[in-house]
């Protein structure tokens, strides 16, 4: 078959519901290299500070709804609905929802 489908309802969130939710869909979709994640972040919430040096993967964050700030090596990049950012593996990053509504993002990553 030339395609696979998945829903965030097919996998367990790795983030407690009170903070939003984070659903890794890579395995459910059967992708070899591409990571694909849905992230919902409540107002005041933040993601884990990290880089992807160990995996060598670049990441793209696309904001579906709401707004977020991404701290990238000490610089703040503000994004709203319809905006995206691409991050090199070695860049330290952390997502913050400093808005008043839940933010929904799609995160994709693959090795360079």
Image (spheres, helix red, strand yellow):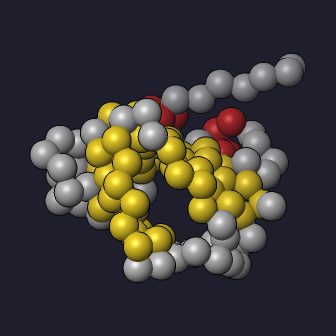
Residue 12: image x %, image y %? 44, 46
Q: Quadrant of the C terminus?
A: bottom right
Q: How many marks?
A: 0
Position of residue 62 measured from the top left corner of the image (x, y, whole percent): 49, 42
Position above or below: 99 against 5:
below
Front residue of 16/71: it is 71
| The image quarter in which residue 67 lies | top left
Going 66% across and 66% down the picture, which residue do you hit? 88
In this picture, residue 78 sits left or right of residue 93: left
In the rendered view, tell whether residue 7 sits above or below residue 92: above
Is 98 placed left or right of 57 in the picture?
left
Observer-nearest residue: 49 or 2?
A: 49
Residue 1 vs residue 55: left or right?
right
State whether residue 105 appears in this view.
yes
Coordinates of residue 93 in the picture (x, y in percent) = 47, 70
Residue at screen point 73% across, 55% down: 110
- Report the front residue among 24 and 45: 45
Q: Is residue 58 above or below residue 108?
A: below
| Farthest right residue in view | 1
Residue 20 visible in the displayed image: no
The quadrant of the rendering that contains the N terminus is top right
**In x, y percent, where is residue 79?**
37, 48
Q: Residue at x 41, y 79 (%)?
A: 74
The residue positioned 35% from the left and 54% from the top of the image is 78
């Amino acid at each position: 078959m030339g395609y696979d489908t998945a829903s965030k309802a097919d996998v367990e969130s790795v983030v407690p519901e009170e903070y939003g939710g984070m659903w890794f869909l890579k395995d459910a979709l059967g992708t070899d290299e591409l990571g694909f994640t849905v992230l919902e972040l409540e107002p005041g919430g933040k993601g884990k500070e990290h880089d992807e040096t160990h995996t060598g993967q670049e990441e793209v964050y696309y904001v579906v709804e709401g707004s977020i700030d991404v701290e990238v090596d000490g610089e703040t990049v503000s994004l709203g609905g319809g905006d995206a950012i691409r991050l090199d593996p070695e860049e330290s990053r952390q997502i913050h929802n400093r808005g008043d509504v839940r933010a929904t993002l799609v995160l994709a990553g693959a090795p360079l």
